[in-house]
Image: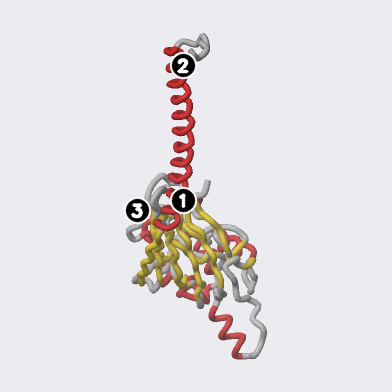
């Protein structure tokens, strides 16, 4: 007995089977594609976590500072370098060279602690008679001027001769010097004082400073104190700051100071150091 005829041509059934096979193949490819993407993503995360490593270097600088350089190497991101430095900032140095340099894409964060004194002669004098010193010890935030017998004109002259003129003395200051200015920066500053003074920044206890100069720079720090000025325009102000109303008893000393250009006279009267911690890293957006 013959089988009933379905009415569907043999070729149509064959083509349908092929199409159905392609649909199965497509679904299979999509499935394995998703599995591949999942495994690839997992591998990236795995190798990134395993491949990330750190390299630590330590160096003792000529100025006594200790510098740590930590370089983080990552398989799928740019290397990250952070520098940590710790050193003492002497209060009697005009523009202390930290030896630290900043690229144009970097910033530095300062943390400063400790106390200094800006008039050691008053410490000795008052200690000799067991009396409280009217000139206090100062932190990195500085103090307001204390009048210990100066005239108003003399006080005004002294305030104008601070590295950063104003009402505060003894606070910590910074300057980012382009490399072509960094060689003997103290002398360079003195010769261009009026031009460079506005570029001085205040740090005090803590501050983050980006390098926005567009150049590689070196970091200089200083305690804010009186720096005498022996340029023609600055000489009369310096004389007033030292002599006040012109007391003849100090005139001989002033003649020696001016003739020898002893501009750091007031810095040499300072004692103590600040502890400075610096962190250098890429700029934060």
Of pointers 2 and 1, the one earlier in the residue sequence:
2
Label 3 Cα crowd, 10 Å radius (few <14 / some 14-19 / many 20+): some
Residue that badge 2 annotates:
13
Of pointers 3 and 1, the one earlier in the residue sequence:
1
Indicate how the structure is coloured in the image.
secondary structure
Give the Cα distance between marks 2 and 1: 48 Å
Give the Cα distance between marks 3 and 1: 41 Å
Q: Residue at x 46, y 74 (%)?
A: 268
Residue nearest the observer in this picture, 284 or 241? 284
In the drawing, what numbered circle is on residue 179?
3
Label 1 Cα crowd, 10 Å radius (few <14 / some 14-19 / many 20+): few
Camera-near label (3 vs 1) is 1
Residue that badge 1 annotates:
45
Above or below, 33 against 73 in this view is above
Check if mark 3's residue and mark 2's residue have beta carbons within 8 Å: no
The image quadrant that residue 262 belongs to is bottom left
Secondary structure at badge 3 equals: helix
Camera-near label (3 vs 2) is 2
Q: Residue at x 45, y 56 (%)?
A: 49
The image quadrant that residue 148 belongs to is bottom right
Give the Cα distance between marks 3 and 2: 83 Å
């Amino acid at each position: 007995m013959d089988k009933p005829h379905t009415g569907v041509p043999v070729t149509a059934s064959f083509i349908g089977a092929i199409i159905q096979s392609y649909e199965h193949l497509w679904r299979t490819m999509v499935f394995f594609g998703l599995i591949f993407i999942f495994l690839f993503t997992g591998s990236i995360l795995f190798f990134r976590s395993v491949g990330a490593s750190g390299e630590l270097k330590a160096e003792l600088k000529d100025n006594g500072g200790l510098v740590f350089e930590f370089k983080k190497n990552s398989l799928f991101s740019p290397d990250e370098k952070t520098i940590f430095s710790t050193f003492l900032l002497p209060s009697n140095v005009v523009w202390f060279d930290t030896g630290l340099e900043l690229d144009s894409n970097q910033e530095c964060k300062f943390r400063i602690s400790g106390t200094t004194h800006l008039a050691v002669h008053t410490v000795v004098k008052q200690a000799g008679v067991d009396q409280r010193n009217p000139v206090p010890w100062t932190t990195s935030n500085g103090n307001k001027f204390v009048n210990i017998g100066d005239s108003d004109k003399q006080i005004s002259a002294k305030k104008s001769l601070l590295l950063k003129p104003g009402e505060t003395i003894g606070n910590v200051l910074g300057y980012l010097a382009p490399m072509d200015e960094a060689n003997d920066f103290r002398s360079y500053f003195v010769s261009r004082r009026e031009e460079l003074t506005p570029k001085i920044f205040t740090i005090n206890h803590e501050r983050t400073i980006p390098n926005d100069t567009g150049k590689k720079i070196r970091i200089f720090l200083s305690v804010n104190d009186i720096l005498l000025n022996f340029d023609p325009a600055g000489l009369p102000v310096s004389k007033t700051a030292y002599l006040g109303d012109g007391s003849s008893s100090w005139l001989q000393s002033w003649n020696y100071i001016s003739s020898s250009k002893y501009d750091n006279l007031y810095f040499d009267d300072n004692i103590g150091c600040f502890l400075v911690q610096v962190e250098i890293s890429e700029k934060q957006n």
